[in-house]
Amino acid sequence: MSEGRTPTGLLAIDRVAIGYAAVTGALSLAGGLRGMAFAALHALVIFLIVRMSRRPLPRGQLATFFRLLYPVIATPLLYHELSYLNQFVVTGYFDSIVQGWEVAVFGSQISQEAAGWFPALWLSEFMTVGYLTYYFVIPLLAVGCWASAGKVGFHRLGVTVALAFAICYTWFILFPVMGPRYWYGALEGALSEGSIYQFTRELLAGGSSKGTAFPSSHVAGTCAAWFAAWRVDERGFFLAAVPVVILVLSTVWGGFHYAIDAVAGLLIAWIAFVLGPRLAAWAPLPDDSSAPDAS
């Protein structure tokens, strides 16, 4: 440890990561020998986080960026294991229940009708681009928070987004839902012939995890970052408004999620937005972490 520099201790972002790893690791024990392997891996992750917390924040900006956002950066790996974990505790999927909620709230299966309201190929491609902005909006909002509010604001955003993902991913294990793309099949016909839609379809075929539809973590994670930016980076918040709204709509329009998935994702984003700053204040960065980085 560098002389005169304070170890971080367990930051709020670490506590969210440990809580998620502990809960999901315990749930995976229901999966027999394979589940025990996942539980052991999660225990190792907890051990490594605790060890990392005994060191001060790195001095370099890029290293600090990763240190304060690592649970969010790791979501592709965490997402990939969900297709296994969500069949350890329960067997099967709860789409029929969610479809009932969909009809009760909206009067029909919106995910199967929305594209037909405006059947234009250009709109299909446009909405698919909106869906793909998920991979860019969160990192850009994080960079904006770093620039506007420094490490403290950045840590707050990281905690908020990580909490939203943690809630969604834990729910997927307890209540797996395939979603309309698996239940009804992907969008077909002329609206599916665009190159962007075809690319997205192949991307999801190779990287999606079955049983992760309700709530939409796509919506929850993106909107949690967007809400967090409201507090510390108003410029980024307003610049991201149109892409975020299009992203939320596109998850349903393209048949990737039920409409009720998007609504639930928005609710979880709001819960994370309310709780995230409180968690960040409870386990904040050490006093010396806001000092200028050594060049």
Image (cartoon, rainbow, N blue to C red):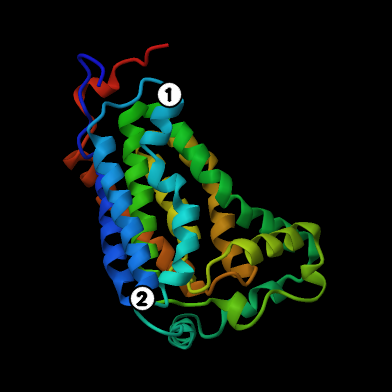
Residue at the (56%, 51%) spot, across then down: 134
First along the sequence among labels 1 and 2: 2
Name the residue tied to disc 2.
31
| 237 relative to 192 in the view: left or right | left
Name the residue tied to disc 1.
61
Tag 2 secondary structure: helix
Instruction: Quarter of the image for the N terminus: give it.
Output: top left
Position of 260 relative to 295 (above/below): below
Q: Position of residue 68 (x, y in %)?
A: 36, 36
Label 1–label 2 contact, CB within 8 A: no
10 Å neighbourhood of mark 1: few (<14), some, or many (≥20)? some
Position of 135 relative to 143 (above/below): below
| 244 relative to 18 in the view: left or right | right
Q: Position of residue 3 (x, y in %)?
A: 22, 14
The residue sitting at the left extreme is 282
Which-is-in-front pick, marks 1 and 2? 2
Instruction: Quarter of the image for the C terminus: give it.
Output: top left
| 257 relative to 66 in the view: left or right | right
Residue at the (54%, 55%) spot, across then down: 245
